[in-house]
Image (spheres, helix red, strand yellow):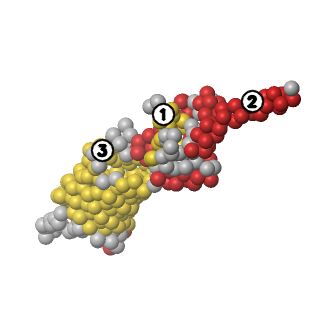
Amino acid sequence: MLRPLIALPIALAGLVGLATHPRVAAAEACSPAVVLAGDPQAIATVAELLSARGVALEVGACGVVKAQIERRGEGLAIVVEQADGTTIERVVGEAQTAATVIESFTHGEMGDPLLASRAFPREVATAPNVRLEAPVPRSAAQRSARGVQLFSAFETSYASDRTSWIGAHLGACVMLGPVCAAARLRLANVEAGPGPWNGEVERRSIELLVGIDIPFALGGWTFSPGFATGLGQMHTRGATQGERAETGGLRADVHATLSIPLAHRLAIDVFTAAELTQETHIEWGAMMTPLPDEPRVLARLGVGLRYGGL
């Protein structure tokens, strides 16, 4: 009687061992494996974390999990291809979480709860794309450098005849691809100078110039070198004798403007220019008092405002 009772537990234990042994062998033969693709820097970081957790980065006996890792804003986007060919996308904030998500697809007991959870809604996943398309620090400068720009400035000039001028200009600029076609109207008066300029002679000028500016981004600022040409006229009057002279001719200048954003579409301009005037000569009669000739070169410096992006 005792022998059958002893044999029964042994037989049951053997059956249990036979039932569980294939699973153990299969588990030992089937190690988790992952193939990573995508951003090299992200792959290196995630691969190191997976290796530390015992996840092989090669094809194993029981298949492979394919994971595509890309940077999306400040986070990481992961696209995992499952054995049945379906893909699942996740967006995480750091490499540690990315490694956990990928590892979950190699262990079914970990994968079920992770697949059901949605820690990062799809709205959050698309938010970095919007932020990348419209960077806040640079968008203000870019908006002010497109379309039509209006500008004005006060300026001071020093001429080759040692006269000092005070004036202003008003202009507009239209973006045509990488360049801005500009036109400006300039008015100026002589304020001081040697000899007859101490109150005996008065002179004012008016100019209309057209040209091209080429804007370059300097961080949030814009630097715009350019050139212009046009026509100008000077009116000179002798205060004592009453002589008058009106001369005119071609004008050409090279200039550079630095635009510093102040607010939305509004910037402060600091500019400098060197201008060349056409040489003119007036024949004076014997009874007339000659008036000073026009200066050939003027150096200008000014500051003003610019409204852009119309």
Disc 2 crowd, CA 10 A, few/some/many (<14, 14-19, 20+): few
- Residue 83 is tagged as 1
Q: Which residue is mark 3?
A: 175
Residue count near mark 1 (Cα–Cα under 10 Å), binned few <14, some 14–19, many ≥20: few
Q: Which mark is first along the chain, 3 or 2?
A: 2
Q: Earlier in the sequence, mark 1 or mark 2?
A: 2
Q: Nearer the viewer, mark 1 or mark 3?
A: 1
Identify the secondary structure beneath mark 1: loop
Q: Position of residue 301 (x, y in %)?
A: 38, 61
Q: Nearer the viewer, residue 92 or 147?
A: 92
Q: Where's the C terminus, which quadrant?
A: top left
Q: Residues within 10 Å of mark 3 (few under 14, many from 20)?
A: some
Residue 265 visible in the displayed image: no
Residue 123 figure quarter: top right
Q: Quadrant of residue 14?
A: top right
Secondary structure under badge 2? Answer: helix
Disc 2 residue type (three-letter)? Leu
Q: Is the N terminus in the top left, top right, bottom left or bottom right quadrant?
A: top right
Say which label, 1 or 3, has the lower sequence index: 1
Determine the residue positioned at 56% across, 33% down: 124
Give the side of residue 291 with respect to residue 75, left or right: left
Q: Amino acid at mark 1?
A: Ala
The percent position of residue 270, horizontal first and vertical second, equals 42, 57
The amino acid sitting under disc 3 is: Met
* SS class, disc 3: strand
Q: Which residue is disc 2 drawn over?
A: 12
Residue 174 visible to an observer of this rendering: yes
Name the residue rendered at 46%, 49% in the picture: 39
Above or below, 67 relative to 2: below
Q: Nearer the viewer, residue 87 or 122?
A: 87
